[in-house]
Image (spheres, grey):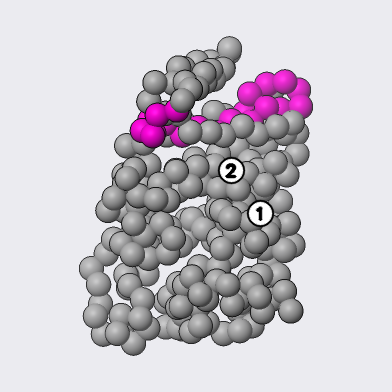
């Protein structure tokens, strides 16, 4: 079945998923499907294992990648289009805020391998710009150092290697789109739940003193239980 194929492909990438209750996996795959997220598309959504602090067991969550957040953002009422991209060294890039908000990005070809910025902005049906959200490569590196635990998940290497890591660009795009959704997205109730869940796991993945006895039992990196980060009322797009 489709559930079995999805579970098998993700367990190959992340063996910790085999420790999860099968019904937990089915529930998370179903949740993603209800949001229109497709596990077969790279960087759209993934099953990510984590430690449940209350039950002291391993569970998983469907966590969107940058394509998943772009898809959720495009479901916002009043949004005509969503633009997001990477700015590279040598590109012409400028942002103007205020009554005449605008973003200009003129890529240079051939493009440089050196990334300088990530950005996301929406265009309202009324014609106005929603956002923008801009993060420098340095800000994305700091975000990774704060929220990612080394070797954990597909972005594990970004923590130590920064912009030299293989998945730095997908991580940067996901981070800037997540911030856009948090600040400006008019998401559905299910979309807000997915966003909150991702933010909660990001808080749980902050670097904390490890507890070796729990690590040995669960085979996962541990940390004290964090305060939950909740988004309750995302802003609606305005002109």
Measured from the top left, where is residue 149 in percent x and y? 33, 62
Q: Nearer the viewer, residue 189 or 31?
A: 31
> What is the magenta segment's predominant secondary structure?
strand
Give the percent coordinates (x, y) of residue 21: 57, 85
Q: Which residue is mark 1?
A: 191
Where on the picture, by quarter, is residue 181?
Answer: top right
Mark 2 closeness class: few <14, some 14–19, many ≥20 residues within 10 Å? many
Whether 168 is among the magenta residues is no
Report if the CB atoms under discs 1 and 2 are less than 8 Å apart. yes
Give the camera-side residue of 156 and 214.
Answer: 156
Residue 44 visible to the viewer: yes
Q: Residue at x 37, y 65 (%)?
A: 152
Residue for point 73% across, 57% down:
36
* Magenta run includes residue 115: yes
Assign a secondary structure to mark 1: helix
Mark 1 burial class by Cα count in 10 Å: few <14, some 14-19, many 20+: many
- Residue 133 higher or lower than 20, as above or below: above
> At x 45% / y 28%, what residue is drawn?
111
Q: Which residues are magenta?
A: 111-130
Q: Kindly identify which numbered label has been placed on residue 181.
A: 2
Residue at far top of view:
100
Q: Is residue 218 above or below residue 190?
A: below
| SS at circle 2 | helix
Q: Is residue 9 above or below residue 120?
A: below
Q: Position of residue 236 (x, y in %)?
A: 67, 36
Q: Which of the 4 image quadrants contains residue 126?
A: top right
Mark 1 or mark 2: which comes first in sequence?
2
């Amino acid at each position: 079945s489709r559930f079995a194929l999805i579970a098998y492909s993700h367990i190959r990438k992340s063996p910790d998923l085999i420790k999860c209750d099968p019904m937990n996996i089915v529930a998370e795959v179903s949740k993603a499907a209800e949001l229109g997220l497709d596990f077969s598309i790279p960087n759209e959504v993934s099953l990510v294992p984590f430690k449940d602090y209350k039950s002291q067991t391993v569970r998983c969550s469907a966590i969107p990648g940058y394509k998943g957040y772009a898809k959720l953002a495009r479901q916002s009422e009043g949004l005509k289009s969503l633009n997001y991209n990477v700015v590279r060294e040598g590109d012409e890039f400028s942002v103007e805020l205020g009554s005449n908000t605008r973003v200009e990005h003129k890529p240079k070809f051939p493009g440089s391998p050196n990334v300088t910025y990530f950005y996301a902005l929406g265009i309202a049906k009324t014609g106005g710009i929603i956002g923008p959200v801009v993060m420098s490569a340095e800000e994305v590196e700091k975000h990774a150092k704060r929220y990612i635990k080394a070797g954990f998940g597909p972005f594990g290497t970004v923590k130590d290697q920064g912009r030299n890591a293989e998945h730095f660009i997908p991580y940067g795009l996901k981070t800037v789109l997540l911030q856009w959704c948090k600040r400006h997205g008019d998401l559905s109730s299910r979309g807000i739940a997915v966003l909150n869940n991702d933010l909660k796991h990001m808080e749980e993945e902050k670097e904390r003193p490890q507890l070796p006895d729990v690590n040995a039992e669960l085979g996962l990196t541990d940390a004290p239980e964090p305060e939950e980060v909740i988004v309750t009322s995302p802003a609606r797009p305005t002109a």
